[in-house]
Image (cartoon, grey):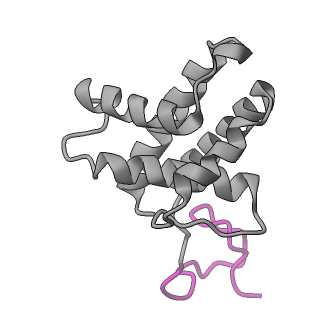
């Protein structure tokens, strides 16, 4: 998932967690309905950026993320035809478990989007002193 799509998916999952946490267990809506309603609200409030991806795609990415965390033994793709039906399986979980799953999905999309780029050294260290270099911490040649 590219960083922009990850960001919109994270925004949707975060809002779904907030809304579901405010619901009593008996009034909790099905996850697919909640995600579909919230993505439209976020779009209407211009909270998905200036050029959001397809709203259906954002819902599918959020659903796939939730399903992959809930059922890691089966890889779920955003293009799976049975996403809504499989998401219904999660609706049978107790509310606290659904909230933990949404929280984990939010951490997953946030942490992957915020990982710093790997540091690569293009050549040998420039320091040539025999003591520790202030610039890079390298001990230098011995």
Q: Which image quadrant for residue 17?
A: top right
Residue 55 seen in this snapshot: yes
Q: Residue 4: horizontal and vertical position, in percent?
A: 36, 53
Residue 139 is one of the magenta-drawn residues: yes
Is residue 14 highlighted in magenta? no
Which range is magenta?
A: 121-142
* Residue 67 placement, left or right of 3: right
Q: Residue at x 71, y 15 (%)?
A: 26
Say if 11 sits above or below 22 in the image. Answer: below
Q: Where residue 68 sits in the image (x, y, percent)?
A: 67, 59
**Residue at point 60%, 41% (across, down):** 106
When the figure is inspected, residue 85 is found, relative to residue 97, above or below; the finding is: below
Query: Residue 110 in the image: x percent, y percent?
Result: 55, 45
Pick the residue in front: 35 or 137. Answer: 35
Q: Main secondary structure of the magenta part?
A: loop
Q: Measuring 64% from the left and 43% from the top, which residue is drawn there?
A: 88
Q: Quadrant of the C terminus?
A: bottom right
Decide which of 75, 52 is in the foreground and name it: 75
Q: Is residue 114 visible?
A: no
| Quarter in which the N terminus is drawn | bottom left
Disc tally is 0
Q: Nearer the viewer, residue 94 or 142?
A: 94
């Amino acid at each position: 998932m590219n960083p922009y799509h990850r960001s919109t998916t994270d925004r949707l999952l975060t809002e779904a967690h907030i809304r579901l946490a405010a619901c009593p267990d008996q009034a909790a809506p099905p996850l697919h309905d909640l995600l579909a309603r919230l993505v439209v609200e976020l779009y209407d409030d211009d909270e998905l950026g200036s050029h959001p991806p397809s709203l259906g795609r954002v819902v599918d990415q959020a659903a796939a993320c939730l399903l992959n965390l809930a059922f890691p033994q089966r890889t779920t793709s955003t293009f799976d035809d049975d996403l809504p039906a499989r998401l219904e399986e999660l609706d049978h979980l107790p509310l606290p478990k659904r909230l933990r799953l949404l929280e984990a999905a939010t951490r997953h999309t946030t942490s992957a989007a915020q990982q710093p780029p790997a540091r690569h050294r293009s050549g040998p260290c420039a320091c040539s002193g025999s003591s520790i270099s202030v610039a890079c911490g390298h001990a230098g040649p011995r």
